[in-house]
Image (cartoon, rainbow, N blue to C red):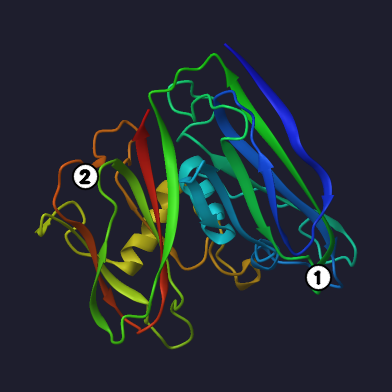
């Protein structure tokens, strides 16, 4: 089997806009989206650079294949590949050139002919990048996008990644969130607003419970701090045991993993169920963010 890696966007000046580009028609393994720019006075942090990419979406006609904010893409990359997205030049020199690359996957593993996005017709599959012009902490931005096609692949399924904002429920305590049904769910990713700081054990979400047909399944009762600890299974942390290293990455994010051994054995199967929901015990009355990673049969 052959692959083609080619450029879709080359050295485009990053501006405040929504970029729309038709994607190639051959089966797609993944995209590589790279934002490059200069430090503005001091070292631009990962969080600051991510903020200039608001959201990335891939639509098949009107069907959402991929739709995540940049912070959630960085966490997804870490979940799938057990490594941080590549951010170059970790120095504080003014005008030092830095680049950040994010992978937009259509399967859990790259270059997998059985799990990628299938062949399409011209104009059916479109990439949208919602950008803000880099400024203040990171400037003179340019964006590059490359695609990886798998020639002749006949995938059985692809990875669908979508997200939604969970509004502040109005009070602390239990907050039930309906999950999509019909597909196998690989993982759920929760990003909070509040995380513990000085003299505080407070998490935006204290406890997570999964209910299928109103019965506990899998994650019967998991506390946030223990789910943070699960990051060890996802390559979440290099040694970061002194203050100068800063916060753990990705910040404020936890996963409910249904494919821990990457063998499909524990996938959350939702076809035919009448109800599938998360019960979040909120420690703070505030908004949070849920990303769902599903396998869609072709």
Q: In whole angstroms, how far apart are the C-alphas of marks 1 and 2?
A: 44 Å
Badge 1 local density, few (<14 within 10 Å), some, or many (20+)? Answer: some
Question: Between 274 and 276, which is closer to the camera in this rendering?
Answer: 274
- Residue 135 is tagged as 1
At x 85% / y 70%, what residue is drawn? 40
Q: Is residue 248 above or below residue 33?
A: below
- Seen in the picture, residue 50 relative to 283 is either above or below; the reply is above
Q: Quadrant of the N terminus?
A: top right
Secondary structure under tag 1 reads loop
Nearer to me, 112 or 162: 162
Q: What is the x, y in percent for residue 289?
A: 42, 66
The image shows residue 111 at horizontal and vertical percentages of 54, 25
Q: Nearer the viewer, residue 19 or 258?
A: 19
Task: State the residue position of label 2.
Answer: 270
Q: Are marks 1 and 2 in contact (CB under 8 Å)?
A: no
Left or right: residue 115 compared with residue 245: left
In the image, 191 versus 294, the foreground residue is: 294
Q: Which mark is residue 79?
A: none
Q: Residue 25 placed where, x, y %?
A: 60, 26
Residue 130 versus residue 296 in the image, above or below: below
Task: Check the image and name the residue furthest to the top.
Answer: 1
For residue 5, what is the image quadrant?
top right
Q: Nearer the viewer, mark 1 or mark 2?
A: 2
Give residue 242's quadrant in the image: bottom right
> For numbered disc 2, what is the local secondary structure?
loop
Instruction: Kindly identify the residue that appears in the image at 50 percent across and 47 percent down.
Output: 66
The answer to whether residue 235 is visible is: no
């Amino acid at each position: 089997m052959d692959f083609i890696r080619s450029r879709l966007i080359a050295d485009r000046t990053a501006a405040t806009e929504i970029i729309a580009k038709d994607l190639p028609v051959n089966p797609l393994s993944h995209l590589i989206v790279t934002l490059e720019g200069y430090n503005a006075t001091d070292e631009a942090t990962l969080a600051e650079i991510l903020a200039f990419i608001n959201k990335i979406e891939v639509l098949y006609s009107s069907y959402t294949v991929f739709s995540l904010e940049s912070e959630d893409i960085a966490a997804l990359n870490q979940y799938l590949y057990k490594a941080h997205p590549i951010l170059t030049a970790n120095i504080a020199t003014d005008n030092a050139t830095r680049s950040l690359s994010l992978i937009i996957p259509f399967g859990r593993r790259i270059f997998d002919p059985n799990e990628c996005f299938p062949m399409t017709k011209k104009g059916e599959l479109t990439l949208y990048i919602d950008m803000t012009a880099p400024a203040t902490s990171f400037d003179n931005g340019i964006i590059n996008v490359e695609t990886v096609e798998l020639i002749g692949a006949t995938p059985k399924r692809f990875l669908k990644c979508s997200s939604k904002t969970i509004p502040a429920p109005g009070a602390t305590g239990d907050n039930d969130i309906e999950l999509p049904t019909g597909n196998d769910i690989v993982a759920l990713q929760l990003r909070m607003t509040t995380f513990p700081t000085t003299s505080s054990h407070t998490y935006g979400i204290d406890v997570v419970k999964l209910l299928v047909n109103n019965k506990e399944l899998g994650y019967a009762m998991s506390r946030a701090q223990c789910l943070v600890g699960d990051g060890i299974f996802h390559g979440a942390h290099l040694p970061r045991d002194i203050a100068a290293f800063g916060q753990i990455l990705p910040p404020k994010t936890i996963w409910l993993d249904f494919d821990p051994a990457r063998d499909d054995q524990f996938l959350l199967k939702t076809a035919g169920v009448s109800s599938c929901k998360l019960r979040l015990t909120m420690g703070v009355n505030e908004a949070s963010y849920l990303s769902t990673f599903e396998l869609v049969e072709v």
